[in-house]
Amino acid sequence: MGGMGFFELPGMIDPKTHSMNNVYIALIGIVLSFVLGFIATMIFWKEDSSKDKVATGQNDEEKNVSQELIQIPLEGKVLPLSEVKDEVFSKGYIGKGIAIEPTKGEVISPVNGTITTFFPTGHAIGITSDSGVEILIHVGMDTVNLEGKHFKPLVKKGDKVTVGQKLLNFDLEEIKKRRVFSYHTCCCN
């Protein structure tokens, strides 16, 4: 059974005496429940701003990042990230960025900053620029399966780097022979 509503009010009229007393009492109860509910809401309401922050991507840890010029970290043909056959990159789940079909097996630093991550397999580098921009340079698709073969890191986690500094050498021809995707991605957050 559900609660009483306005359509139940005519059913409260006394059929013998046609008295409306029960209807009046019910109307007073309905009005009181609305008024008391409104007052309780006004007294106890607290704005939950954490939901708004999550929805807009804002949080206390978010850094104030200014616009920064990011150099291309590899020589080659620049393509939209949407052309990469890995949805994690092509759909932008990791961040906005570009794909590059390389012509040279060398990765250079696109910004002045610090190496925050260097995967043991050498296929991915995380850099945080001096102004707080986080950049992921991912060399190839499925290159993690090469287990570090054909990659020669030139820096390590924690190193300070400058624009144009060599970070990594890789054997482009060997990677192509193994039919690993040759697209390389650069994503920013």
Image: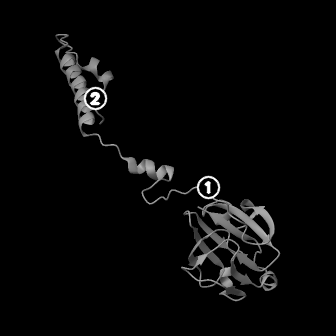
Q: Which mark is residue 4?
A: 2
- Kindly identify the amino acid type of the residue bearing the numbered disc 2: Met
Q: Which residue is mark 1?
A: 67
Q: Residue at x 83, y 75 (%)?
A: 103
Q: Quadrant of the N terminus?
A: top left
Please tell me how crowded label 2 is: few (under 14), some (14-19), or many (20+) other residues with Cα within 10 Å: few
Would you identify the image quadrant in which residue 114 lies?
bottom right
Q: CA distance from mark 2 to mark 1?
A: 60 Å
Q: Nearer the viewer, residue 98 or 181?
A: 98
Q: Residue at x 28, y 33 (%)?
A: 3
The percent position of residue 41, horizontal first and vertical second, equals: 27, 35
Mark 2 and mark 1 lie on one chain; the one further toward the N terminus is 2
Please tell me how crowded label 1 is: few (under 14), some (14-19), or many (20+) other residues with Cα within 10 Å: few
Foreground label between 2 and 1:
1
Q: Are marks 2 and 1 in contact (CB under 8 Å)?
A: no
Looking at the image, which residue sits at the far bottom? Answer: 149
Report the number of numbered marks. 2
